[in-house]
């Protein structure tokens, strides 16, 4: 067949029948002939029309059902379990680990309009973070405190990139883990710059003291912030520590009858498109917060007029986007948006104050 011609259902049926018909008379040929058909379908899946793909699925289900019925009467054994796993692979009810790893590097699974709208805003804000860090490093860093602050802030660039990469590929649970890490890094960067002695605790060997003095809540208190951070809690609930909220995003009910509820556990990302929209919006929010922290920490090293113009442009665009694509969807679904609103208010207050130092 032509390498670019669409394969119809009739053509696929003819190909499969030509190879499987001899196996009916000679079962010893079945394995090799079936493999020819399966290999053909895998290689040509993108060129097979809907009818051909449906025919392929029916073939898999038929073969799998035949094998399952044949195995049903056999005693439990490692060989039987291996066969059942192989059958499940053909029916897409079991998975190969290598495919999930490959999946991270493949083109996006689907197009999300909100993601496409968010990407230029995210990249623009992240570029501004990198620009300000470049300016700040034109002067020498002095002492462990300044080294620690700079380390934390450069670290955020990697975390933000990974967060957005995962979000647009529907790995939102993991996205929030990286965004929460950024939140930790920003508070520590500010702490080490204001209180350089705390960097000695950070780099020390007293683990108990480190946990006590540099836990997220302890750092917030030292910075004069509320011990409880609603946005931090929002990220935690959606992506850390095996929370119920995170599991909800990865689970889908597939059936219910008296006394029995059937659910599907999602691997390879979340099951809901709206979760991708929310996660990507959170990436923009966190990047703007990072930009504000960099401006605040390195106030004396930056051109203040340029910094204010940059923050004003990036923040106002982000606030409008986030109100439309983060706050409103969360409110509509009955979710607690207090943390997000607090963060947006903090951005607005930073702009109105026209200064970013202590």
Image (cartoon, rainbow, N blue to C red):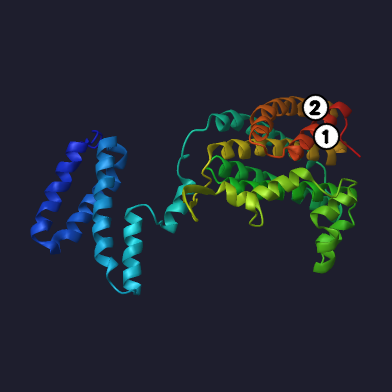
- Seen from the viewer's position, the closer of residues 214 and 84 is 84
Within the image, what quadrant is residue 143 found in? bottom right
The answer, for residue 298, to whether it is visible in the render is no
Disc 1: CA contacts within 10 A as few (<14), some (14-19) or many (>=20): some
Q: Is residue 237 above or below residue 290?
A: below
Horizontal and vertical percent position of residue 148: 80, 53
**Which residue is at a point 40% across and 57% down the rendered structure image?**
94
- Alpha carbons under labels 2 and 1: distance apart: 8 Å
Which quadrant of the rendered structure holds the N terminus? top left
- Seen from the viewer's position, the closer of residues 306 and 242 is 242
Q: Is residue 3 left or right of residue 100?
A: left
**Which residue is at a point 31% across and 59% down the rendered structure image?**
87
Which residue in the protein does label 1 denote?
A: 302
Circle 2 sits in a helix, a strand or a loop, which is it? helix
Q: Is residue 174 left or right of residue 33?
A: right
Horizontal and vertical percent position of residue 111: 49, 33
- Seen from the viewer's position, the closer of residues 305 and 250 is 250
Q: Is residue 218 left or right of residue 240?
A: right
- State yes or no: discs 2 and 1 in contact (Cβ < 8 Å): yes
Q: Which numbered tag is attached to residue 306?
A: 2
**Which residue is at a point 52% across and 32% down the rendered structure image?**
112
Horizontal and vertical percent position of residue 211: 81, 63
**Which residue is at a point 31% across and 74% down the rendered structure image?**
75
Circle 1 sits in a helix, a strand or a loop, which is it? loop
Q: Is residue 71 above or below residue 99?
A: below
Which quadrant of the rendered structure holds the C terminus? top right
């Amino acid at each position: 067949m032509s390498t670019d011609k669409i394969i119809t259902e009739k053509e696929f049926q003819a190909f499969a029948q030509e190879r499987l018909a001899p196996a009916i008379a000679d079962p010893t040929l079945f394995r090799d002939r079936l493999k020819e058909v399966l290999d053909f379908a895998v290689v040509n899946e993108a060129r097979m029309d809907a009818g051909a793909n449906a025919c392929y699925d029916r073939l898999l289900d038929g073969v799998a059902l035949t094998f399952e019925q044949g195995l049903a009467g056999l005693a439990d054994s490692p060989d039987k379990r291996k066969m059942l796993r192989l059958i499940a692979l053909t029916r897409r009810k079991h998975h190969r680990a290598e495919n999930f790893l490959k999946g991270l590097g493949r083109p996006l699974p689907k197009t999300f309009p909100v993601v496409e709208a968010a990407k230029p805003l995210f990249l623009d804000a992240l570029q501004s973070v990198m620009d300000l860090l470049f300016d700040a490093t034109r002067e020498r860093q002095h002492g462990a405190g300044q080294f620690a602050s700079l380390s934390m802030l450069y670290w955020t660039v990697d975390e933000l990139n990974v967060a957005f990469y995962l979000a647009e590929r529907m790995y939102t649970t993991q996205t929030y883990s990286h965004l929460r890490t950024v939140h930790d890094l920003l508070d520590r960067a500010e702490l080490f710059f204001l209180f350089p002695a705390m960097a000695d605790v950070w780099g020390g060997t007293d683990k108990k003291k480190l946990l006590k003095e540099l836990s997220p809540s302890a750092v917030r208190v030292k910075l004069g912030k509320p011990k409880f951070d609603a946005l931090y809690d929002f990220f935690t609930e959606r992506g850390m520590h095996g929370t119920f909220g995170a599991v909800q995003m990865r689970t889908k009910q597939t059936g219910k009858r008296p006394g029995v509820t059937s659910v599907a556990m999602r691997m390879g990302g979340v099951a809901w498109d709206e979760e991708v929209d929310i996660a990507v919006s959170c990436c923009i929010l966190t990047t703007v917060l990072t930009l504000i922290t960099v401006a605040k920490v390195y106030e004396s090293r930056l051109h203040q007029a340029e910094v204010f113009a940059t923050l004003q442009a990036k923040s106002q665009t982000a606030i409008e986007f986030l109100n439309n694509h983060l706050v409103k969807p969360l409110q509509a679904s009955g979710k607690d948006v207090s943390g997000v609103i607090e963060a947006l208010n903090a951005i607005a207050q930073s702009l109105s104050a026209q200064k970013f130092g202590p």
